[in-house]
């Protein structure tokens, strides 16, 4: 079967599943059916993509033309939609094929659809279909339709819990941002298609853009796709919308949909628009570094488990953007090998983050299911009640804290190597700038570890902070299996990075004509990203060495010294207090960091109200954080729009005479223009 | 220096094992030296050098008292922390650059290993659910969030100078005379010393001898530990001190270190040189700690921000001086 036919067949299957999902409210079996179809469809698509990457079809990339869609303006009059599976598409399709089946398996057991499961079941397959179609689209029309399909389906999914006020607000902000983003993309593709209006990617690739048009295309793409990816300052919708959706959907929005947005950026920047200047790389670097640092700092001060994870997504997308920016800088300066290294780092982090964030959001879903709470201050001690989830989440937290030997560390290490290679750039300003970016990335890595120690420590460790947390039960077997599978993938990709690089190599070959040196099975121990450098990394060695050393210590201590254990009340310097409120809370844990970083960036203010002795009212501590991006950027825009529409609104209440006058004036104006131009 | 000289060999395996055992054997003595120097400088007689060994052995043989609310993580954390730090210390070239695990001795990996140890220790501090464990973890995270980037900046400087992040290669390259004295290396040295002081919970950032609760950082995190678990945490701290001293010696004073395929004589010289450098480092640390007062917790961020800035300056000076 031709590969693309199989993928389109999978999409058709998903659309069929959406119809079944409509009956989800009355028919209990609809849920499992929808999710099983999703698993099968995405496994098929992912498998096809993997084959395409490892053993490319003979005679070029598979293409497919469907007789629907817009009339082709270039040739004869005919309706057509173009699809193609090239190596870049295949790589991102493979990410979907890895993340979606596991998350769908988790979703089978996840009963958090409220009273109306159809609200999720009908749109879940549509969302997946949209993402797959974006990846295989080979003309601007198909791309934009699929993009909008994906956006709207995910918007409906965000609205699944529409009875909560904050969900409605989140969905509103998301809709506004998504529409604005699509509008920007529409303009970008309009410019790309040019005056001839040939919207096929092949024609766009062949055409040549004027410099100014290329600048506009890049900027519009960064606005359109960057807002979907969650790049600062267009990230505001993300931490609202991603957590509002049901957890499996959050997992896919954060883990998969942001990658689709990055795919759009890569597709336009490295493929469609042709060679552009290095300044694009600078934009990506600055925006990426801002996203990384701001994302993790926002996340550090959140109390909502899923919001915190969503901010961590902003951070990680920032890291990927840094990689892409470096790739563009190296490419524009003719340093193809280094560009391939930076691109490999970015794409590796796409895989890492897709797996890790799917894992963490599913784990958060399991916690939410078990306790009914996303507020981490009401959780705690879940490691005793949910052992499997706790282990999987520990791996996820360690992975996003970039700890070896997990996959998150490999991509971070590669990004650092690419940053070090920045010394080879000829521009002086860039060398200094990249050193600063390196410092910011290091800061991000350290803060991410703090974020996940805080999240994990408060949710899973300590003593239960509420009755619900004390009585939590472990997730269902299917959910546990999904978590274990995702965690295993994270470990595997970290220990054997060459396997991931094997599927990245064809992509960098396609985009940059260059790739990192082939690692091969023979040299699987040491991962050497640059041919003439001594820098190398080995996940296997780290894993084995830690395991061996830890075992030696355990054996030696238990044999030679003591292995007796006595359980006793906590010591706590002699003043243990049985009340769980006396433990450190999430807010107190991040208080030093809030004082160091929050004072300037979030105008953090603390107000302590300590009643004098004898006064019986409780002491209060109020903490206020202000989101300056929202205040300085969005509120003026929203305010301006509001003001403008208020003025326009007056036009609704005029007399008919006025309206006739307006119409007459407009008509004369247009006629005058025609008269002048003709 | 090509990769062939670093090829794994029987010799390098033996040296690697020897080195791994040696760091464990020497680490408590270093802590003993620091304590002895501090005692003598403050007019006390001080405990003998081998007191840390006796303390560790005493703790190891005691039964471990584990809090009722503690989970498996609390009991696993000492082993993970100790193993990660031990691995880190075993990877740093000390008396010879010829170590079996040479190719994985990447400076970024080293920082991440220390980060991993910190990750587990901080989680262990939160596990029992007491306020002291929390305060320790909280402050440790604040300190680490600035110390780690500062350390990475120093690493950047050195890596840019040599063109690799691999530590044996860096040591060998710096052993050659081609590098010479550089302003950026000086700045880097100051930065990494500041980081080392913060990361090892030393005065003025933290006080390893204090049991005044409100000023503790590291001690507060491991407050609930006892018996063998405490012994491992203490030993990990001792090995970490050796790790930093060894790292500083390896980058900034590699002289005396035996090159790969050197004879026994060179190894002997390397060993003596390394031991001398360690003792000197410990004495200097004791001197420094005695001559300075502990600062407030929230001044630590300024101290470390200065380290970060110095690290960044080191990178920039390097670009300027090298005319890259």
Image (cartoon, coloured by chain):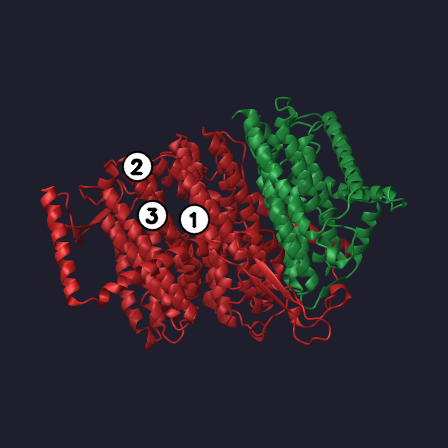
Chain colours: A red, B green
* CB atoms of marks 3 and 1 within 8 Å: no
A111 relative to A660 in the view: left or right: right
A4 relative to A441 in the view: left or right: left
Residue A274 is tagged as 2
In this rendering, the answer to whether A161 lies above or below A397 is: below
Q: Position of residue B183 (x, y in %)?
A: 63, 28
- Whichever of callouts 3 and 2 sits on the residue coming sooner in the sequence is 3
Residue at 29% x, 70% y: name it.
A20
Residue A350 is tagged as 1
Q: Identify the chain of the residue marked 3, using the numbered disc in the image.
A: A
Whether residue A343 is visible: no
Between marks 1 and 2 in the image, the one whose residue lies nearer the viewer: 2
State the SS at label 1.
helix
Query: How many callouts does the rendering have?
Result: 3
- Whichever of callouts 3 and 1 sits on the residue coming sooner in the sequence is 3
How far is disc 1 from disc 2 in space, using C-alphas?
23 Å
Residue at 42% x, 45% y: name it.
A347
Residue at 46% x, 40% y: name it.
A521
Q: Identify the chain of the residue marked 2, using the numbered disc in the image.
A: A
């Amino acid at each position: 079967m031709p590969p693309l036919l199989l993928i389109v067949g999978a999409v058709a299957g998903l659309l069929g599943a959406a119809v079944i999902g409509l009956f989800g409210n009355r028919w209990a079996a609809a849920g499992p059916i929808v999710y099983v179809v999703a698993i099968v469809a995405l496994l098929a698509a992912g498998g096809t993509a993997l084959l395409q990457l490892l053993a490319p079809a003979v005679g070029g990339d598979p293409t497919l033309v469907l007789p629907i869609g817009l009339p082709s303006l270039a040739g004869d009059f005919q309706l057509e939609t173009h699809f193609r599976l090239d190596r870049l598409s295949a790589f991102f399709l493979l990410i979907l094929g890895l993340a979606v089946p596991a998350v769908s398996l988790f979703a089978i057991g996840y009963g958090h659809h409220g009273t109306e499961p159809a609200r999720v079941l009908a749109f879940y397959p549509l969302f997946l279909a949209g993402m797959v179609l974006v990846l295989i689209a080979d003309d601007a029309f198909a791309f934009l339709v699929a993009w909008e399909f994906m956006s709207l389906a995910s918007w409906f999914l965000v609205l699944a819990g529409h009875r909560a006020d904050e969900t409605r607000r989140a969905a509103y902000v998301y809709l506004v941002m998504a529409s604005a983003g699509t509008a920007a993309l529409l303009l970008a593709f309009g410019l790309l298609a040019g005056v001839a209006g040939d919207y096929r990617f092949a024609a766009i690739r062949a055409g040549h853009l004027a410099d100014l048009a290329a600048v506009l295309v890049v900027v519009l793409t960064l606005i359109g796709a960057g807002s979907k990816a969650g790049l600062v300052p267009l990230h505001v919708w993300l931490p609202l919308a991603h957590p509002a959706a049901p957890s499996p959907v959050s997992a896919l929005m954060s883990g998969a949909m942001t990658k689709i947005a990055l795919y759009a950026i890569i597709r336009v920047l490295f493929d469609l628009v042709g060679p552009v200047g290095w300044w694009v790389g600078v934009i990506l670097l600055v925006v990426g570094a801002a996203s990384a640092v701001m994302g993790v700092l926002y996340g550090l001060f959140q109390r909502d488990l899923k919001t915190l994870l969503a901010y961590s997504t902003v951070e990680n997308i920032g890291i990927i953007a840094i990689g892409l920016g470096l790739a563009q800088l190296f490419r524009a300066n003719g340093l193809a090998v280094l560009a391939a290294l930076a691109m490999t780092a970015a794409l590796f982090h796409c895989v890492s983050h897709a797996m890790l964030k799917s894992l963490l959001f599913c784990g958060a879903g399991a916690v939410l299911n078990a306790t009914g709470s996303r507020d981490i201050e009401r959780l705690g001690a879940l490691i005793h009640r949910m052992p499997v989830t706790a282990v999987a989440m520990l791996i996820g937290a360690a992975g996003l804290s970039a700890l070896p030997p997990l996959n998150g560390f490999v991509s971070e290490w590669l990004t650092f190597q690419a940053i070090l290679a920045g010394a080879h750039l000829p521009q002086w300003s860039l060398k200094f700038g990249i050193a600063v970016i390196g410092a910011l990335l290091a800061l991000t890595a350290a803060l991410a570890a703090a974020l996940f120690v805080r999240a994990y420590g408060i949710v899973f460790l300590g003593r239960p902070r509420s009755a619900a947390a004390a009585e939590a039960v472990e997730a269902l077997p299917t959910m546990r299996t999904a978590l274990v599978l995702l965690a295993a993938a994270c470990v595997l990709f970290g220990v054997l990075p060459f396997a991931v690089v094997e599927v990245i190599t064809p992509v960098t070959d396609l985009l940059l004509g260059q790739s990192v040196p082939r690692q091969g099975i023979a040299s699987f121990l040491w991962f050497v990203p640059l041919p003439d450098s001594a820098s190398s990394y080995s996940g296997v060695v780290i894993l084995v060495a830690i395991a061996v050393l830890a075992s030696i210590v355990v054996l030696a201590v238990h044999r030679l010294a003591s292995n007796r254990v006595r359980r006793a009340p906590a010591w706590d310097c002699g003043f243990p207090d049985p009340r769980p409120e006396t433990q450190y809370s999430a807010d107190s844990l991040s208080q030093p960091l809030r004082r160091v970083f929050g004072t300037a960036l979030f105008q953090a203010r603390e107000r302590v109200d300590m009643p004098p002795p004898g006064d019986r009212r409780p002491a209060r501590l109020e903490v206020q954080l202000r989101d300056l991006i929202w205040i300085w950027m969005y509120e003026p825009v929203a305010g301006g729009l509001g003001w403008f529409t208020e003025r326009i609104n007056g036009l609704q209440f005029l007399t008919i005479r006025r309206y006739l006058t307006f119409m007459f004036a407009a008509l004369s104006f247009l006629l005058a223009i025609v008269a002048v131009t003709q | 220096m090509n990769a062939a000289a670093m090829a794994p060999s029987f010799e390098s395996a033996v040296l690697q094992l020897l080195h791994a055992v040696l760091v464990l054997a020497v680490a408590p003595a270093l802590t003993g030296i620091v304590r002895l120097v501090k005692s003598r400088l403050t007019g006390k007689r001080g405990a003998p050098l081998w007191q840390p060994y006796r303390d560790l052995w005493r703790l190891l043989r005691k039964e471990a008292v584990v809090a009722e609310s503690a989970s498996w993580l609390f009991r696993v954390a000492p082993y993970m922390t100790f193993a990660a730090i031990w691995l880190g210390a075993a990877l740093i070239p000390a008396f010879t650059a010829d170590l079996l695990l040479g190719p994985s001795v990447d400076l970024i990996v080293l920082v991440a290993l220390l980060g991993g140890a910190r990750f587990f220790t901080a989680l262990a501090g939160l596990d029992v659910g007491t306020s002291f464990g929390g305060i320790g973890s909280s402050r440790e995270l604040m300190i680490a969030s600035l110390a780690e980037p500062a350390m990475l900046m120093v690493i950047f400087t050195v890596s840019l100078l040599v063109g690799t992040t691999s530590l044996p290669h860096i040591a060998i390259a710096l052993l050659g005379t081609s590098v010479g004295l550089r302003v950026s290396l000086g700045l880097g040295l100051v930065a990494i010393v500041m980081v080392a002081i913060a990361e090892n919970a030393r005065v003025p950032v933290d006080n390893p001898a204090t049991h005044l609760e409100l000023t503790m950082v590291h001690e507060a995190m491991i407050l609930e530990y006892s018996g063998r678990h405490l012994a491992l945490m203490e030993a990990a701290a001792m090995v970490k001190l050796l790790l930093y001293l060894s790292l500083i010696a390896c980058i900034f004073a590699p002289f005396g270190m035996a090159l790969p395929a050197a004879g026994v004589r060179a190894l002997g010289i390397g060993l003596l040189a390394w031991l001398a450098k360690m003792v000197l480092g410990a004495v200097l640390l004791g001197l420094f700690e005695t001559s300075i007062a502990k600062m407030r917790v929230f001044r630590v961020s300024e101290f470390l921000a200065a380290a970060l800035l110095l690290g960044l300056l080191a990178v920039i000076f390097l670009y300027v001086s090298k005319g890259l």
